[in-house]
Amino acid sequence: MRVPGYEIRFGDWKAEVVARGAGLRALTRGGRALTETWPAQEEPPLSAGLVLAPWPNRIRDGRFRFDGVDHQLSLTEPARENAIHGLVRRDIWALVAHDEHRVEQTIRVGLHKGWPYPLQLRVVHELGPDGLVVTHTATNIGAMPAPFGLGVHAYLRVGDVPLDECTLHLTAGTRLPLDPERMLPSGPSRSVFGTEYDFTSPRTLDGVWLDTPFSSIVPDPDGRARHTLRAPDGSGTVLWTDRRFAWVQVFTADPARGQGYPERGRALAVEPMTCPPDAFNSGIDQVVLAPDGEWSGTWGIGTV
């Protein structure tokens, strides 16, 4: 089946959003790529650009207890015995509206094994003078309270500059340690200051490998928290989030590890998340949607 794609433009900004997973397939400014891309009718490597809901990241053993009821989800990461990245990243979202600057898509999260909570999700990708703004909305259309979380697999780049020549700046003060075998939380969050995970000042990515959830994110006075990938010439790509995204997972994909983009070399995911891995068990930053309740959050990509 041919997957629809929707191009949007504003000034020298251009983006393409696809229906599968409501994925951001490409974003450029003045012809310079700001995100990793992939052939339009192929599966995105490492779920690049896709929306992850109604939970991001992993749920241990696919099991969680909510409102006094135990649930067993399908193990969609069987090698690690986890349920990973929600229920909609491989599905085709329905087009609601599309014009020159904006595209809106929606999908219903129906009933699945271990998931008795119907939700309606909506995402709007819009280009303006400052770049891309993405707004997500989730509505509980069921009769019971529902747990909820959301993330996005955003991969950043600064044109064709190799990742190892770039620096990364994260406005995050803590990181959540993970068990390297199952990539699940192995203890409470820890301060990053003075450690190998400290990117509160820009640091080179040469030789750095990360698959790490960060939190204690500090917003600027305008309420947006900004994370910046910068090239040696000072140009950069900025991913920003509003306060609804309390977490960011940073992942370095390396072709030497069988991951990602062999034609480009290493790649960097900076993934806005509302909650950490296994939040449906820890309860950390888990959203609870009452019947007819709605959640909304916004993030975007700009330049410096």
Image (cartoon, rainbow, N blue to C red):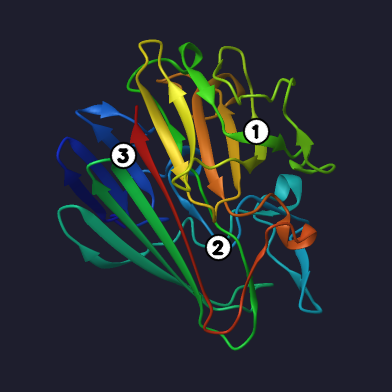
Quadrant in which the C terminus appears: top left
Residue carrying label 1: 211
SS at mark 2? loop
Determine the secondary structure under disc 1: strand
Q: CA distance from mark 1 to mark 2?
A: 22 Å
In front: 52, or 189? Answer: 189
Residue tagged 3: 26
Residue 254 picture location, percent across and down:
56, 23
Q: Which residue type does callout 2 highlight?
A: Leu
Q: Position of residue 16 (x, y in %)?
A: 27, 45
Mark 2 surroundings within 10 Å by alpha-carbon count, few (fewer than 14), some (14 through 19), many (20 or more):
many
Q: Is residue 179 visible to the viewer in this orientation of the structure?
A: no
Residue type for callout 1:
Asp
- Three-letter amino acid code at disc 3? Ala
Q: Circles 3 and 2: CB distance less than 8 Å?
A: no
For the residues labelled 3 and 1, the Cα–Cα distance comes to: 23 Å
Q: Which residue is mark 2?
A: 87
